[in-house]
Amino acid sequence: MTTPTVAVSKGKIAVGSKNFTEAFIVGEIYAQVLERAGYEVERKLNLGATDIAQAALVAGDIDLYPEYTSTGLMTVLKAPPLTDEAAIYQAVKAGYQEQFNLVWLEPAPFNNPQALATTKTVAEAHKLATYSDLAAAAPELVLGAPPEFIEREDGLPGLQKAYGGFAFGEVRPLDAGLRYPALESGDVDVVVAFGTDGQISGFGLQLLQDDKKLYPPYQVAPVLRQAVLDAHPDIAETLNAISRLLSTEKMQAMNWSVDGPDKREPAEVAQAFLVEAGILTP
């Protein structure tokens, strides 16, 4: 009688994530790809904010998690913002290696910066394509924004300093969950958004172009401990290959699958993405 062959695990990898939809999905994508590559994966998703995830990584409680380049630059390294994607990546790659012995793998193509979104109807009526267009048309429009956006330097004051104008007819303070319903109902004309919000694709909204590049890029990438990469060098190519497939459109659609009416689980959405990409079999 022949004994069945049992696949030998390459080892255990603890994958973490922060505490929002996109982080859950990307963390699941990393976890499932690593399982496909032969690793036993321990999921520690939904850890919390940046400081908690970073502390867990440094302490070795997790081995890797998805982080955003400008978050790493400004929040973790406490460095001033940059506007060039390559410069930001090189800065975080060098800074994390020097300060924490952590490695940044390749960033995904998608960018998730703070943004301004409107409906296509409003955009056409007011000829809005860029922030410069919006700065001029603002007196005729109502902005829906988080309360802190009105005072923060990277909020309305920053827009007014960079572009001039931006004197909205009205600014309505709105919590995150109320922004898109208010836009859809016509209670506001423009909302503060993020580049890969699922509602942008789900509702067919228009992101306006930050033509003076006020907001820095936020590309996501796996950040992992050097010791883990030394022990398992194949992880780099495994995760880099999947990162290259994460476009803005794909990420918006996946976020909408979780946050929209379908209310799918992040693990299910991640699996469907990997099946479509030919990484996993149905």
Image (cartoon, helix red, strand yellow):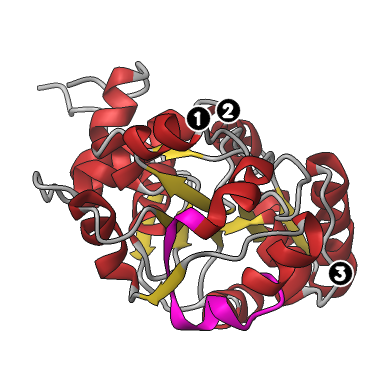
Secondary structure category for the residue under label 3: loop
Distance from disc 2 to disc 1, alpha carbons, whole Å, reads 8 Å
Q: CA distance from mark 2 to mark 3?
A: 27 Å
Query: Is residue 174 covered in magenta?
Result: no
Q: Is residue 85 visible?
A: yes
In space, the residues marked 3 and 1 are separated at their CA atoms by 26 Å
Using the image, tell me which numbered label, if any, was put on residue 247. Answer: 1
| Residue 264 percent location from the top left of the image | 13, 47
Quadrant where the N terminus sits is top left
- The label on residue 244 is 2
Residue found 49% across the figure and 34% down from its top: 248
35 up-or-down from 263: above or below: above
What amino acid does circle 2 point to?
A: Arg
Residue 80 - label = 3
Quadrant of the image containing the C terminus = top left
Please state which of the two labelled residues, at mark 2 or mark 1, is closer to the viewer. 1
Labelled disc at residue 160: none
Is residue 32 or residue 170 the one in the foreground?
A: 170
Boundaries of the magenta span? 140-155
Give the amino acid at mark 1: Ser
**Residue 56 in view here:** no
Q: Please give the name of the residue rendered at 33% of the width and 59% of the height, measured from the top-left corner.
A: 188
Q: Is residue 276 above or below residue 112?
A: above
Cβ atoms at labels 2 and 1 below 8 Å apart: no
Residue 116 at x, y = what percent?
A: 51, 51
Question: Where in the figure is residue 5, as x and y percent of width and height?
Answer: 26, 28
Is 92 located above or below residue 201 in the figure? below
The reply to whether discs 3 and 1 touch (Cβ–Cβ < 8 Å) is no
Quarter-wise, where is residue 280 in the image?
A: top left
